Amino acid sequence: MNRARALWRHPAAAPAGVLAAGAVGALYLYGTDPHEPGHWLPRCPFQWATGLLCPACGGTRMVYDLMHGQFTAAWHDNRVLLLAAPFALALLGRWAYEGLRGRRWRPRVSARGQAAILVVALLWTVLRNVS
């Protein structure tokens, strides 16, 4: 196997790619206010198709507000996503850590855990569209 192919198959390649893409996206987002029109940020396809807010709607605005120290605004943009973000970042960190150690890692979520995540997402979708 040649060296380039071996690098792409290394367990750290995928988390490194995700982190690099996230860094590029964060750099663009830092200078682009998603609260204002005229940016290249995509619109939520679920909201575009249905007119309803999805569980992640407001996530881009939330990240922008967090990067600019506006914690109250981030809370108002998407409360559930803000509360879930530390867990997602911990999973990303663990994935990168295990990859750097040469091990492939996948989080295991029980069927009960998956159901709980789905119920929270559905309840959040209903609550934010009713109120």
Image (cartoon, rainbow, N blue to C red):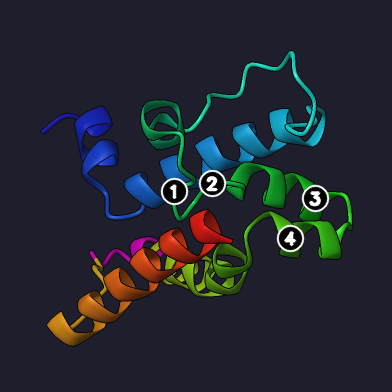
Q: Nearer the viewer, residue 48 or 95?
A: 48
CA–CA distance between discs 3 and 4?
Answer: 10 Å
Residue underneath mark 2: 57
| Marks 1,4: beta carbons within 8 A | no
Residue at label 1?
Answer: 54
Residue that numbered label 4 is attached to: 76
User: Start and end of the magenta stretch?
Assistant: 98-104
> Residue at label 3?
65
In primary-sequence order, the first of circles 3 and 1 is 1
| Three-letter residue code for mark 3 | Asp
Q: Alpha carbon of mark 3 to alpha carbon of mark 1: how far?
A: 19 Å
SS for callout 2: loop
Toward the viewer: 26 or 34?
34
What kind of residue is marked 1?
Cys
Q: CA distance from mark 1 to mark 4?
A: 15 Å
Location of residue 6 in the rendering, given as x and y in whole percent from the top left corner: 21, 39
Report the front residue among 120 and 31: 120
Mark 3: which secondary structure? helix
Mark with earlier residue (1, 4): 1
- Mark 3 in CB contact with mark 1 (< 8 angstroms): no
